[in-house]
Amino acid sequence: MKIFCIGRNYVDHAKELNNQVPKQPLVFMKPPTALLRNNDPFYIPEFSEDVHYELELVLKIKKNGKYIQPAFTKDYYESIALGIDFTARDLQSKLKEKGHPWEIAKGFDNSAALSSFVNLPTEENIKFQLFKNDVLVQDGSSQDMIFNFDTLIVHISKFFTLQQGDLIYTGTPAGVGPVSIGDHLVGTLQGQTLFDFYIK
């Protein structure tokens, strides 16, 4: 099982971090050990003093495919979840300054929170929200993606064989921010709560 992640897939998020808006999907990966499931608490790692939440829609690949063409992309997914791409922002900033890879800032253990999966909504405009301590901090819509689900599948499958069970974290909208011990995170998809856990 592979975990693909997409960076800067919402214009407002790219701008809030002073990043250029990409012309093609920005793909990075997390290892399977990054998964955090079942509403388990997220423990802030000792190597970072500035861990940020990034709420994302997550697709699960349902069959194997390579060089998938646009006409067939919808055959490869039918369920969706919410995820959080936890990011050690202080480490990431230092690594980016040096031009170094930043996997350790993105792929550390438990850095990919994942809710249960539900059937993909029939609406084209999928709304999702993150509440931190009962305050709305991220309010996203799939129609605001720079690269939609189908475009991501076409692009990723050029370079990597997609396999059943692979996950695609499709990018975060604006509103990312830090977490602290004791914070309570709740994620909703189309108004339905899909995860509810604490920071420790």
Image (cartoon, rainbow, N blue to C red):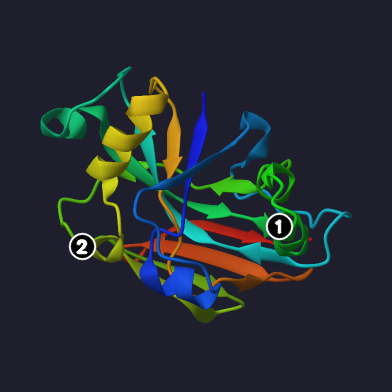
Secondary structure at badge 2 equals loop
Q: Earlier in the sequence, mark 1 or mark 2?
A: 1
Residue 92 badge: 1
Relative horizontal placement of residue 167, taking residue 196 as reference (left or right):
left
Helix, strand or loop status at disc 1: helix
The crowding category of the residue bearing disc 2, from other C-alpha atoms within 10 Å (few below 14, some 14 to 19, many at least 20), is few
The image position of residue 154, as x and y in percent, is: 27, 34
Q: Quadrant of the C terminus?
A: bottom right
Residue position for label 2? 125
Q: Position of residue 108 (x, y in %)?
A: 73, 43
Amino acid found under the numbered disc labelled 2: Asn
Residue at (68%, 43%) from the top-left corner? 103
Question: Which residue is the extreme one toward the right?
Answer: 46
Mark 1 or 2: the one toward you: 1
- Compared across the picture, whether 73 is left or right of 175 comes to left
**Front residue (pair 56, 119):** 56
Residue shown at 77%/64% (left/top)?
A: 90
Residue drawn at (59%, 42%), measured in percent from left and top? 37
Q: Amino acid at mark 1?
A: Gln
Identity of the residue furthest to the left in this view: 71
Total number of numbered discs in the rendering: 2
Nearer-the-camera pick, 75 or 133: 75
Task: Tell me the distance, in whole angstroms, between the alpha carbons under discs 1 and 2.
Answer: 31 Å
Residues marked 1 and 2 touching at CB (< 8 Å): no
